[in-house]
Amino acid sequence: KYLFWRARSREKLAEECKRMEAEQTAETHNDVCNMENRNFFDGLPADESYYGYLIKLRSKSGNSSERIALSVPEKPEGEQYERIEVLLQLGLRDDAIAEILESLRNVRTRSEFFYLAFMAMKMDQYKNVISYAEPKKDRELLPYSYPLGYWNTVEPAALSKNLDAHLVAALIREESRFDPAVISWAGAVGLMQLMPSTAHRLKDEIEISLEHSAHLQDPQKNILLGTHYLSQLMNEFKELPLAIAAYNAGENTLKKWLERFNNVDLVEFIENIPYSETRRYVKKVLKSYWQYRTINGLPIHDEGTVFGG
């Protein structure tokens, strides 16, 4: 964070130097305006944190990445793994899930984790997998920490609204860890943590039946409604960080912040967000979005990444 903002300060200085030079008020030999010092972000350590990705975006160093494939693991030897297979063959899904999650809590080796995590994700049990994989630095674990949960619904829903499906996945990850049953303290429900009032306002626009708020725990309905809402926010506010902030804090609140901080760029606007929860939320969703693109072999420089220039 410190290195990023130090570089931003020097970048601002360079912009002022360019203005002065255009007005012929700066001498060409002035050290602070030397052209060799203009590319401030190159060479800075760009990790996979929010600020690390900002450095990559500013320095144009994130245009290519190698996809981290999620391979099908072999079943380890052991009675518990045989039991999982038998339960699945018998159609006892809930019992198999319970066995997998119990084994995952007591996993001992990498091969056991890869098998159990793969099986858990096949049955939409993402939360425990993310919890195990997220703190670790191993790049092989990244597809487990950032899974493409409910992808068969997420991808077409996003494409129908001209959104990047990896953005929707990132928002779901940070909202619910792909747990469709979760309900927040504020009453937001399901994968994309929709407020029932918002969902009921939107349901007729996309012709979804929503007789009760509990229906928001249905993954397909939740994703369709949440993606539609996010697309509306993108259409209204145009910029990705603003849409994400509005998703968390509400459109009217965001409009007040835009009036208050109307002369700053997007990166500074994020730092100025008065609500600490929303400020952290925007950074987490953006970081996850860029991480998803990187894991899946996509450049982080994209029309929706907004911080590239």
Image (cartoon, rainbow, N blue to C red):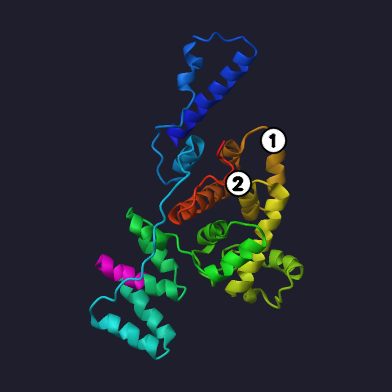
Q: Residue at x 43, y 49 (%)?
A: 65
Examine the structure image and report whether residue 116 is included in the region drawn in magenta: yes
Image coordinates of residue 79 in percent, x first then y, are 24, 83
The crowding category of the residue bearing disc 1, from other C-alpha atoms within 10 Å (few below 14, some 14 to 19, many at least 20), is: few
Q: Residue furthest right?
A: 204
Examine the structure image and report whether residue 40 is included in the region drawn in magenta: no
Residue at the spot of label 2: 303
Q: Quadrant of the N terminus?
A: top left
User: In the visual, does 117 lie left or right of 240?
Assistant: left
Residue at the spot of label 1: 262
Q: In the figure, 209 relative to 16: above or below?
A: below
Q: In the figure, 98 relative to 182: above or below?
A: below
- In what element is the residue under mark 1? loop
Q: Residue 89, located in which quarter of the rendered image?
A: bottom left
Q: In the figure, 101 relative to 90: above or below?
A: above
- Taken as a whole, is the magenta stretch helix, strand or loop? helix
Report the number of discs: 2
- In what element is the residue under mark 2? loop
Q: Look at the image and tell me whether residue 253 can be seen.
A: yes
Please state the extent of the stretch shown in magenta in the rendering: 107-117
Q: Residue at x 53, y 44 (%)?
A: 301
Image coordinates of residue 145 in percent, x first then y, are 41, 60
The crowding category of the residue bearing disc 2, from other C-alpha atoms within 10 Å (few below 14, some 14 to 19, many at least 20), is: few
Q: Residue at x 61, y 67 (%)?
A: 156
Q: Quadrant of the C terminus?
A: top right
Image coordinates of residue 125 in percent, x first then y, are 44, 72
Which mark is first along the chain, 2 or 1? 1
User: In the visual, does 270 lie left or right of 75?
Assistant: right
